[in-house]
Amino acid sequence: GLVPMTRVCLFSDDRTLQTLLSSTLGREFHISQVADEDEMDQLLSSAEFDVMLVDLNSHHENVKERIEYARGVCGVEPPCVILADDALRSTANELVEMGANGYCRRPPAIRDLRNALRRAHESSSLKTRLQTVERQLEVVTGCDRMIGVSPQMQRVYRLVRSVTDLNVSVLITGQSGTGKELIARAIHNLGAHSKRPFVAVPCGAIP
């Protein structure tokens, strides 16, 4: 099958790195390079890449600032992989303990870097999927665990509880994306038929 492309944002002021990595990492990776913290912050807020590759070895006077910046982005999304030479190995290890997804020696052994970037992207994707499933479970396992707390949602929960044990058909109306199927699942899971399967039929697909 097709390998999904991993979008990597390389935070480095070494202009040769992007060319080197783009030509050696392969088509699985798209490398964008940023040298400036403000530009990096803009990209972070736009969520246009999957993994950060933070190069600690910047021009001599910027090393401390680069390390401080790396401390601030460790352990948040998107995941970050640290690139550092042997002189900064202890700092790189400290960043991994703080939540960075990996560390590669500089200059990078391409296979090691490829594996570190893959692992970072995969663990981030798994975390996102897990959060989605957890949110869905919160909604379907009981009204008292649904996320909404507004008076309107409280009214919805009361309505759900009032019909769970009735042997009647229930029509749920609302715009697309408002969670009608989640409400239907909550009614099913809280009712007498909860041990039986919940079957969702996409009526729009039936001619």
Image (cartoon, rainbow, N blue to C red):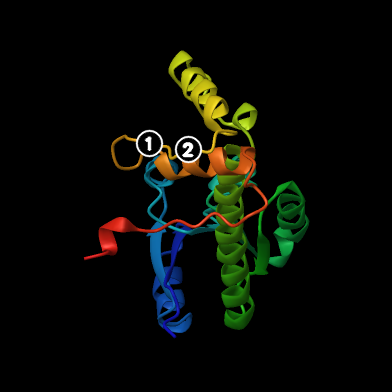
Which amino acid lies under the numbered mark 2 shown in the image of this protein?
Val
Q: Using the image, determine if residue 147 lies above or below residue 73.
A: above
Q: Is residue 79 left or right of residue 35?
A: right
The quarter in which the C terminus is drawn is bottom left
- The picture places residue 52, in percent across and down from the top left corner, at 51, 57
Mark 1 vs mark 2: give the one in front: 2
Q: Using the image, determine if residue 35 lies above or below residue 2.
A: above
Residue drawn 42% across and 52% down? 35
- The picture places residue 14, in percent across and down from the top left corner, at 46, 63
As rendered, which of 104 and 200 lies closer to the eye? 200
Marker disc for residue 59 = none
Which amino acid lies under the numbered mark 1 shown in the image of this protein?
Ile
Q: Using the image, determine if residue 81 lies above or below residue 169.
A: below
The residue carrying mark 1 is 172
Does residue 112 appear in the picture of this structure? yes
Mark 2 crowdedness (10 Å alpha carbons): few <14, some 14-19, many ≥20:
few
Marker disc for residue 168 = 2
Give the farthest residue toward the bottom: 1
- The picture places residue 126, in percent across and down from the top left corner, at 60, 60
Residue drawn 56% across and 43% down? 188
Give the farthest residue toward the top: 151
Within the image, what quadrant is residue 164 found in? Answer: top right
Residue drawn 55% across and 33% down? 166
Residue drawn 59% across and 30% down? 143
